Image (cartoon, coloured by chain):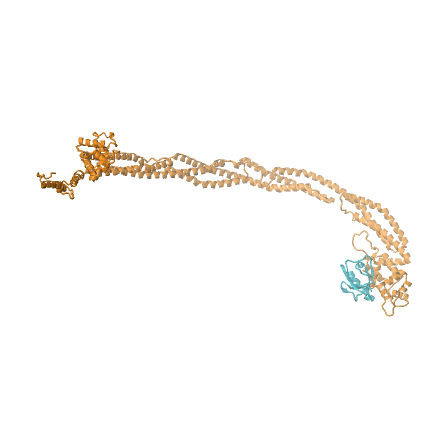
């Protein structure tokens, strides 16, 4: 069963993951790739995990660009809640 | 007295009458004949007769005996005792036993008639002998018949008292007669004695009176003596003598006087009582005389005592005054000690102004002190006056000392005034000098500062970097030199002040300490410094000139460097441009470009020596501390940077061309295509503004994203944000912010080669999935190379749909997601 978790990545970028999806793609915002040794992988993120919120803001209804921008806009710590891939 | 004649009858009654006549006579004599009658006597009553005889004896022989107011028996006894008193071995106590040894009788006889008995030969143990001796002598010489019998007395324990009394009374009468004579003689003697005594008293009185008067006569002058002693001690001695006189010497005299009076009174009384005429003392010795003399004495005494006390008080006061005088003189003299010397000092001759002012103040203080002492001197004089008035014994000494003090006082006054005048005079002179000192200081200080400044300036280390700078320094120096004559004038004036001071000091004989209180600068300092300044001026000239030469040399170096740099700089620039043109211009094939570039490379390598030479010139410049060069805009660093950039650029450009060749060959792009791409790229490769960048190029072979976007749009791409973002990630994966030509070409070739869209990818998947909406792992593995298949399998999400088996993968989402990817 899937479970949700939170991470807080210490800034700044790069965070070490590839974001895929968005409303415009009719796909959830997913972690499609993790950079080896990157912050995301160190925080325990896995490929396929779905981003539920970015810095407390729910990612539901975001299109890819919105999500991307939100993440890119973060200069300090990046807080994500994710759902593990089932 | 005669008895009546007896009757001659022999008859009884005649006898009785006679007896009665006798008895009557006895009675008339006062004797009480108790129970004795004439008859009894006539009758021969023995007892009566004896009694009557005894009564008669008693009355007529004994009763009248009176010895010292003791009468009869007692008187007789007393008489016996008195008379035998000298005889030790006789003790008459009674008229019986006491007479037994016969000594009493003998003593009695011997007492009155020592010639009759040799008493010393009598012995107590021969009473009979003694008695008989006494009887015989009495009978023979004293007409006293023997009435007693010796043996009778001795043998009887207690002899008959009456008999003895009778016998002894005969002795009394015998001697008493003699005694009467004796008494008469006594009386006469007594009277005479009284007279004699009176005379004696009178004589005594006279003598005592004389003595007393003499004593008074002697004493009065002593008490009248008013010669004062000099000292209190002597006067006190006198007082002590007086006390002695009053306590020791006078009292006996008082007593004498009293005695005299008493004696006189007694005498007078005695004389009066003994019926003599009153005593009249000799002239001058009368009672009144004595009283007067005594009164006189006492008066003088009182006067003397008063005088003594007055004198003592006087002396006491004198002593006190003399002491006070001494004390005050002593204190005053102590105060004045050394003052005359002090006042005569010439200490102001070599003092500074401050010291003189201090001396003035001290002197003022002294003047007040002196004034304050005025009344002390007056007091001393007053005391001396009083001592004189009171007749002090050593007034001469006092006066001499007082005079000494007064004279000295006057002298002090004079000296004080003199000193004041002198101090004032010197003070004024010093004030003048002080003013001059101040003026000197006021001028010397700034001048000194100026000289210090000048010296500093003349020795100033300068750093100049241009000929203009050194020139201006030379100008300044020349200006300075122009001020020297004025400065010298100032110096002279300042020194002049100093000389004036010396003149004044010399004229008025003031000793200068040589110290100017307002400044440490001496005229010597000023002159020395001036000489130093003068000395430094030519040195400075020399230094400046040397510097000029140096600057000129530097200038030459600069020009040399500049000449070189001005050639090299542009050369590098030109080459950069040329190289960029080569790469950017669309002329010739890539190979031709390559060749050209290689040629440039060689060219550049060959040119290195010029750079080295320039470095050499640069080093010289730097060693000569040349930091700027207006002859050229090119600094060594510019050249270096430019050179490095040139080297880098040529290498990169060559590399680019190499890559382009590779790309071309790899992608099969024709030269025309490449040229087209190049043209588009160049068009949008905008200028970089500003900067003194040596490698300023119109085209640098890079585009920024905006340029790139514009370029794409011009090429007909319809770009949304997401799409463009995607493309950017492709052309600039490292996020450098620029798009290189190479990347551009890559992108373009990719694009021209294939235009993938999400739909096309989906379509492609669909084909592979045999038209299903999902694809299976097997299908992927079957259709795609293993790597791509696994890539898809791992990335694709499970297909959600009722018509799909397990393991079905959603390629649609995947495909779309392919174009919705962001690397974050």
Q: Which chain is cyan?
A: A
Q: Is residue B232 left or right of residue B260?
A: right
Nearest the viewer among B742 and B183 is B183
Quadrant in which residue A68 is drawn: bottom right
Rendered-image quadrant of the N terminus of chain B: top left
Residue located at (82% from left, 48% from top) = B568
* Quarter location, residue B384: top left
The correct choice, above or below, for B286 with respect to B685 in the image is: above
Q: Quadrant of residue B710?
A: bottom right
On the image, the x and y values in percent for residue B468 come to 73, 45
Count how many numbered circles sit on residues in the image.
0
Residue sitting at the far bottom: B802
Which quadrant would the C terminus of chain B be assigned to in this image? bottom right
Q: Is residue B25 visible?
A: no
Q: Position of residue B538 (x, y in %)?
A: 69, 38
Q: Colour of chain B?
A: orange
Q: Is residue B116 visible?
A: yes
Point out residue B583 in the picture as x, y percentages from the top left corner: 86, 54
Q: Nearer the viewer, residue B552 or B317?
A: B317
In this rendering, position of residue B764 left or right of residue A83: right
Nearer the observer, B345 or B577: B345
Instruction: Residue B662: give x, y in percent of width and height.
Output: 89, 55
Q: Nearer the viewer, residue B47 or A60?
A: B47
Residue B289 horizontal side relative to residue B330, left or right: left
């Amino acid at each position: 069963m899937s479970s949700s978790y939170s991470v807080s990545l210490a800034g700044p970028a790069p965070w070490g993951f590839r974001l895929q999806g968005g409303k415009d793609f009719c796909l959830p915002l997913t972690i499609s790739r993790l950079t080896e040794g990157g912050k995301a992988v160190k925080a325990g993120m896995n490929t396929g995990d779905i981003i539920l919120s970015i810095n407390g803001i729910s990612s539901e209804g975001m299109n890819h660009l919105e999500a991307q921008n939100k993440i890119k806009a973060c200069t300090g710590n990046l807080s994500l809640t994710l759902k593990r891939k089932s | 007295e005669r008895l009546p004649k007896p009757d001659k009858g022999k008859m009884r009654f005649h006898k009785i009458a006679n007896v009665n006549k006798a008895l009557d006579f006895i009675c008339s004599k006062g004797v009480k004949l108790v129970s004795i009658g004439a008859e009894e006597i006539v009758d021969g009553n023995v007892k009566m007769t004896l009694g009557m005889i005894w009564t008669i004896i008693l009355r007529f022989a004994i009763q009248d005996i009176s010895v010292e107011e003791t009468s009869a028996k007692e008187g007789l006894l007393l008489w016996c005792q008195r008379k035998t008193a000298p005889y030790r071995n006789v003790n008459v106590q009674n008229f019986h036993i006491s007479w037994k040894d016969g000594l009493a009788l003998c003593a009695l006889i011997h007492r009155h008639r020592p010639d009759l008995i040799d008493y010393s030969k009598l012995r107590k143990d021969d009473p009979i002998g003694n008695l008989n001796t006494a009887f015989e002598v009495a009978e023979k010489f004293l007409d006293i018949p023997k009435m007693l019998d010796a043996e009778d007395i001795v043998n009887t324990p207690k002899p008959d008292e009456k008999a003895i009394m009778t016998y002894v009374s005969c002795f009394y009468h015998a001697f008493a007669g003699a005694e009467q004579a004796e008494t008469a003689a006594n009386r006469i003697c007594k009277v005479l004695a009284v007279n004699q005594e009176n005379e004696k008293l009178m004589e005594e009185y006279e003598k005592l009176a004389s003595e007393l008067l003499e004593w008074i006569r002697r004493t009065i002058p002593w008490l009248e003596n008013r010669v004062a002693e000099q000292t209190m001690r002597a006067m006190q001695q006198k007082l002590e003598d007086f006390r002695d006189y009053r306590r020791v010497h006078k009292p006996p005299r008082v007593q004498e006087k009293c005695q005299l009076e008493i004696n006189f009174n007694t005498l007078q009384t005695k004389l009066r009582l003994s019926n003599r005429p009153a005593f009249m003392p000799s002239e001058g010795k009368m009672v009144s005389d004595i009283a007067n003399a005594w009164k006189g004495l006492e008066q003088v005494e009182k006067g003397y005592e008063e005088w003594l006390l007055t004198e003592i008080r006087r002396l006491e006061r004198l002593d006190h005054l003399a002491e006070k005088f001494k004390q005050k003189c002593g204190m005053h003299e102590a105060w004045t000690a050394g003052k005359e010397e002090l006042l005569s000092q010439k200490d102001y001759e070599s003092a500074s102004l401050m010291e003189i002012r201090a001396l003035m103040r001290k002197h003022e203080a002294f003047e007040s002190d002196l004034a304050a002492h005025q009344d002390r001197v007056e007091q001393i004089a007053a005391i001396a006056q009083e001592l004189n008035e009171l007749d002090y014994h050593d007034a001469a000494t006092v006066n001499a000392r007082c005079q000494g003090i007064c004279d000295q006082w006057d002298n002090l006054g004079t000296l004080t005034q003199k000193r004041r005048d002198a101090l004032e005079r010197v003070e004024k002179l010093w004030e003048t000098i002080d003013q001059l000192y101040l003026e000197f200081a006021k001028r010397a200080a700034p001048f000194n500062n100026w000289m210090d400044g000048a010296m500093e300036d003349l020795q100033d280390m300068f750093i100049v970097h241009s000929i203009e700078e050194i020139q201006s320094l030379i100008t300044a120096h020349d200006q300075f030199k122009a001020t020297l004559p004025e400065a010298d004038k100032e110096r002279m004036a300042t020194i002049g002040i100093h000389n004036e001071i010396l003149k004044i000091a010399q004229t008025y004989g003031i000793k200068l300490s040589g110290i100017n209180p307002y400044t440490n600068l001496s005229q010597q300092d000023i002159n020395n410094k001036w000489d130093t300044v003068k000395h430094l001026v030519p040195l400075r000239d020399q230094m400046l000139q040397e510097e000029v030469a140096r600057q000129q040399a530097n200038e030459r170096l600069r020009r040399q460097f500049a000449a070189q740099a001005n050639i090299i700089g542009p050369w590098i620039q030109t080459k950069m441009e040329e190289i960029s043109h080569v790469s950017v211009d669309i002329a010739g094939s890539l190979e031709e470009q390559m060749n050209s570039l290689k040629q440039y490379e060689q060219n550049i390598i060959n040119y290195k020596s010029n750079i080295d030479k320039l470095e050499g010139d640069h080093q010289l410049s730097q060693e000569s501390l040349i930091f700027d060069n207006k002859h050229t805009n090119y600094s060594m660093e510019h050249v270096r940077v430019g050179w490095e950039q040139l080297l880098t650029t040529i290498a990169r450009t060559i590399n680019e061309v190499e890559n382009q060749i590779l790309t071309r060959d790899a992608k099969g792009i024709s030269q025309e295509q490449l040229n087209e791409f190049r043209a588009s790229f160049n068009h949008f490769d905008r200028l970089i503004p500003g900067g003194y960048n040596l490698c300023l190029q119109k085209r640098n072979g890079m585009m920024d994203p905006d340029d790139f976007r514009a370029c794409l749009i011009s090429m007909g791409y319809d770009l949304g944000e997401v799409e463009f973002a995607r493309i950017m990630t492709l052309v600039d994966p490292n996020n450098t912010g620029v798009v290189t030509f190479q990347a551009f070409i890559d992108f373009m070739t990719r694009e021209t080669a294939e235009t993938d869209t999400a739909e096309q990818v989906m379509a492609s998947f669909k084909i592979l999935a045999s038209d299903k909406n999902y694809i299976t792992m097997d299908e992927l593995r079957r259709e795609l190379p293993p790597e791509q298949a696994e890539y898809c399998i791992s990335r694709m999400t499970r297909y959600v749909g009722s018509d799909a088996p397990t393991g079905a993968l959603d390629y649609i989402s995947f495909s779309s997601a392919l174009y919705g990817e962001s690397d974050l």
